[in-house]
């Protein structure tokens, strides 16, 4: 593969496109496919053939506003339809070149206002199973440029300059990580893409893998060149069968075109990628646990250092980045680090993809520039809380994050601002809650999650999460005292400070953030035996409640 | 080349050949343990003792390690599933949209708890942490098929349909 051939592929794909007057792009993401969008596409194709219109019915990835699905995008007019049924195919085809079908307007209001597509730029426009369509939109230009015009050090320099930080949650500077792995000496190095996406309520990585898998493959290949790796793994959770299937096809296609394999782009650089399936363990998102899982073992984290950069997969130097991190790489190499850094805040550059869900009018996948306020996202893009209810909190960062109240709605999104407010960026789940949610119950929900997902290797997390869960349950039942609350706070500190891995270290966060902003709800449960949201059944305290303590109660949990 | 004796297939069930195929694809490497267990789980619906023994012996992994892996990951099941499986998402987005009420409804109708199967072997109840359709929460899966924006009444209807069959 050289520049000329790349252009030829792109030109051929363009020519193919030129054979059609219209393109009807039908979403084939998990969400729309579950509503049989494949049947809609077939119907449109058949309909177009029947009436002799030159129309291409394309399978694409997720277009974002999942709740309005199945989604259909008509090009070149750029008309978006929502809640489409197979029976609408006739009308859609008839409307090509004429007035759009008003009935199918998805009513998205200001959903796209302020959104800026970088990671999701191809989503909804290309068939994820066709590598040539990716190339036609500038795909693999960055790889070619990197391999033939830049040294590995120059690639890393651009990534560092871009200010890109890890999108998996921690926000570690990506350039610095690459540089570290590149400097470690080793005959064999690995690149791993973390597609475990354990945060329940987040689906950014799923969407990227399903809709534009080549972008992730290109990012990984550039990374491999930069650090000197010859083998890569994409670790995907088994709950995402469609993502696995699309990736499998994408890897085959990339190999066929020579973007993976031996002598990539007519250089001496070799690299290939395998898929590894997760098996339903949240802790496997943690990098050392993920590595153990790829090695075929139980996913137990181990102490760091040594970091994977020095001793990772099978003891060799390993680079591990998140799906969205890799998806940001190709545009940086194509346009330069400065281009990337021109968007965002001082220390958080570029865009971030969020999965906007919960009690909100317009749910879906959104991509916004760093620095946008929570209010703009929740009330502008998301349209606010429906059913005349009142906004109460927004949860970011998943089980490691926190809940932010109304006072923080004008917070600009950045890694540091979210942490100082007591939450964190996380991988991009953003769950909106209204006044029907009880914040103590929410804290208990996350604690239950951490308790069941704890791998059990270290005592603070294994035993501490059970105790904290019990205390939270006691508060919910209206049986707790102020002393229990003090004990809970103390446990939060101990577990956070002494746990081995990030799961235990951050498990107290949902409790701490709700204690900070919604202490009155805790106190209502404790002092007044009342749940302000009306969720918990706070019965009268049983006799001796204060004397029982929390020990024996743990047994109940395991039963 | 070193000749390694591999255990015979546990039975002449064709599905064992699929399992062997996965191991062969990975060169019978020990690292392929999880991949192989995935194949067993997807072919048979669960992992029983003969299956774990067979995989452990074939890959030369201690039985204790294989068992440890099986019990560590939630995806693997040691019990055969019922004829039908109803899986309810308990991810955060679904929880906020009331999926706990769905679980309560299913428990009430089936008289079993998540992780159990009705005594007649008809329906298994399971929970999952997010299947990625959070935008249309709450979500339930009926025999693996995703159904979003679920309500207790509709869930009850689906369970009834199974029982009517
Ligand atoms: C309990 C736990 C779960 C995690 N889950 C994920 C995950 O699902 N996806 C992810 O990309 N990173 C996850 N991480 C972070 C990874 O350990 C790692 O930092 C990340 O993949 C590095 O990539 P990045 O620098 O591109 O963010 C998790 C960390 C912890 C402690
Ligand atoms: S903190 Fe929890 S998940 Fe992490 S190693 Fe300890 S027990 Fe395992
Ligand atoms: S939380 Fe239920 S599908 Fe994501």
Image (cartoon, grey):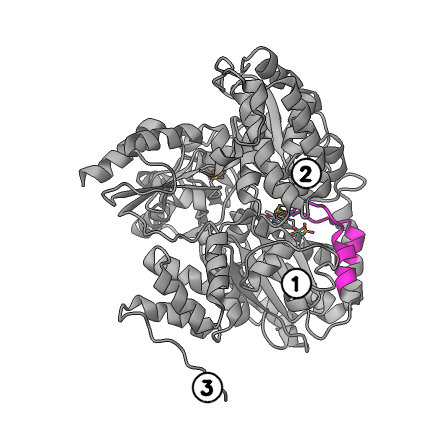
> Residue A176's spot in the image, x, y percent?
79, 56
The one nearer the camera, A322 or A512, is A512
Instruction: Mark 1 and ligand 1: say if the CB distance to the nearest ligand atom is below 8 Å.
Output: no
Residue at the image point whose x is 64% and y is 44% from the top:
A459
Residues under labels 2 and 1: Cα distance?
48 Å
Residue at the image point whose x is 58% and y is 24% from the top:
A440
- Magenta stretch: give its range: A158-181
**Callout 1: helix, strand or loop?**
helix
- Is residue A382 visible in this depiction of the protein? no
Q: Is residue B136 magenta?
A: no
Residues under labels 3 and 1: Cα distance?
47 Å
| Mark 1 surroundings: few (<14), some (14-19) or many (≥20) residues within 10 A | many
**Mark 3 = which residue?**
B3
The answer to which image quadrant residue A383 occupies is top right
Q: Is residue A29 above or below residue A183?
A: above
> Residue A29's spot in the image, x, y percent?
46, 47
**Mark nearer the viewer, 3 or 1:** 3
Mark on residue A141? Answer: 1
Left or right: A208, with A320 as reference point: left
Mark on residue A131? Answer: none
The residue furthest bottom is B1
Residue at the image point whose x is 18% and y is 41% from the top:
B165
**Mark nearer the viewer, 2 or 3:** 2
**Mark 2 = which residue?**
A495
| Whether labels 2 and 1 share one chain | yes
């Amino acid at each position: 593969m050289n520049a000329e051939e790349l252009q030829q592929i792109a030109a051929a794909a363009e020519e193919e496109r030129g054979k059609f007057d219209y393109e009807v792009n039908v979403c084939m993401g998990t969400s729309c496919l579950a509503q049989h969008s494949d049947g809609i596409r077939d119907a449109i194709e058949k309909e177009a053939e029947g009436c002799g219109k030159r129309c291409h019915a394309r399978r694409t990835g997720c277009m974002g506003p999942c709740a309005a699905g199945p989604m259909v995008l008509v090009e070149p007019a750029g008309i978006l339809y929502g809640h489409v049924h197979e029976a609408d195919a006739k009308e859609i085809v008839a409307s090509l070149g004429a007035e759009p079908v008003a009935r199918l307007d998805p009513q998205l209001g200001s959903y796209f206002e302020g959104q800026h597509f970088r990671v999701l730029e191809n989503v909804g426009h290309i068939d994820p199973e066709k590598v040539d369509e990716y190339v036609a939109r500038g795909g693999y230009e960055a790889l070619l440029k990197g391999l033939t015009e830049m040294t590995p050090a120059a690639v890393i320099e651009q990534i560092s300059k871009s200010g890109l930080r890890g999108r998996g949650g921690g926000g570690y500077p990506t350039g610095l990580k690459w540089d570290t792995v590149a400097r470690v000496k080793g005959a064999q190095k690995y690149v791993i893409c973390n597609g475990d996406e354990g945060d329940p309520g987040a689906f950014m990585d799923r969407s990227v893998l399903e809709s534009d898998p080549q972008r992730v493959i290109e990012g990984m290949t550039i990374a491999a060149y930069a650090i000197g790796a010859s083998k890569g793994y994409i670790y995907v959770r088994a709950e995402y069968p469609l993502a696995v299937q699309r990736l499998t096809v994408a890897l085959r296609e990339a190999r066929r075109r020579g973007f993976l394999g031996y002598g990539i782009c007519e250089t001496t650089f070799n690299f290939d990628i395998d898929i590894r399936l997760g098996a339903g363990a949240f802790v496997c998102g943690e990098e050392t646990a993920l590595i153990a899982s790829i090695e075929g073992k139980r996913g137990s984290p181990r102490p760091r250092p040594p970091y994977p950069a020095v001793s990772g997969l099978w003891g060799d130097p390993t680079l591990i980045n998140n799906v969205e991190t890799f998806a940001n790489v190709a545009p940086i190499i194509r346009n330069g680090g400065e281009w990337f850094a021109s968007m965002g805040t001082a220390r958080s550059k570029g865009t971030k993809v969020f999965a906007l869900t919960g009690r909100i009018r317009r749910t879906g996948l959104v991509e916004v520039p760093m620095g946008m306020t929570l209010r703009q996202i929740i009330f502008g893009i998301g349209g606010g809380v429906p059913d005349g209810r009142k906004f109460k909190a927004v949860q970011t960062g998943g089980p490691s994050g926190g809940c932010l109240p109304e006072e923080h709605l004008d917070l600009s999104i950045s890694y540091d601002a979210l942490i100082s407010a007591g939450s964190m960026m996380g991988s991009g789940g953003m769950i909106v809650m209204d006044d029907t949610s009880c914040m103590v119950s929410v804290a208990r929900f996350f604690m239950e999650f951490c308790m069941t997902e704890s791998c059990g290797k270290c005592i603070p997390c294994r035993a501490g999460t059970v105790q904290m869960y019990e205390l939270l349950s006691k508060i919910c039942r209206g049986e707790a005292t102020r002393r229990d609350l003090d004990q809970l706070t103390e446990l939060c500190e101990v577990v956070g400070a002494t746990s081995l891995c990030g799961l235990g270290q951050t498990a107290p966060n949902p409790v701490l953030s709700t204690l900070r902003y919604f202490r009155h709800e805790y106190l209502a449960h404790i002092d007044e035996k009342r749940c302000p949201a009306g969720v918990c059944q706070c019965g009268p305290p049983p006799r001796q409640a204060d004397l029982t303590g929390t020990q024996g109660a743990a047994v109940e949990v395991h039963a | 080349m070193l000749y390694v004796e591999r255990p015979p297939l546990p039975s002449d069930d064709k599905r064992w050949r699929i399992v062997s195929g996965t191991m062969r694809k990975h060169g019978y490497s020990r690292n392929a343990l999880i991949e192989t267990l995935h194949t067993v789980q997807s072919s048979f619906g669960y992992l029983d003792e003969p299956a774990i023994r067979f995989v452990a012996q074939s890959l030369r992994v201690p039985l204790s390690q294989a068992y440890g892996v099986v019990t560590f990951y939630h995806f693997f099941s040691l019990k055969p599933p019922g004829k039908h499986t109803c899986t309810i998402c308990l991810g955060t987005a679904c929880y906020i949209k009331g999926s706990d009420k769905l679980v309560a409804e299913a428990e009430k109708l089936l008289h079993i708890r998540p992780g159990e199967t009705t005594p007649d072997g008809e329906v298994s109840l399971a929970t999952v942490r997010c299947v990625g359709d959070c935008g249309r929460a709450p979500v339930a899966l009926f025999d693996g098929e995703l159904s979003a924006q679920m309500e207790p009444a509709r869930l009850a209807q689906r369970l009834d349909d199974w029982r009517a069959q």
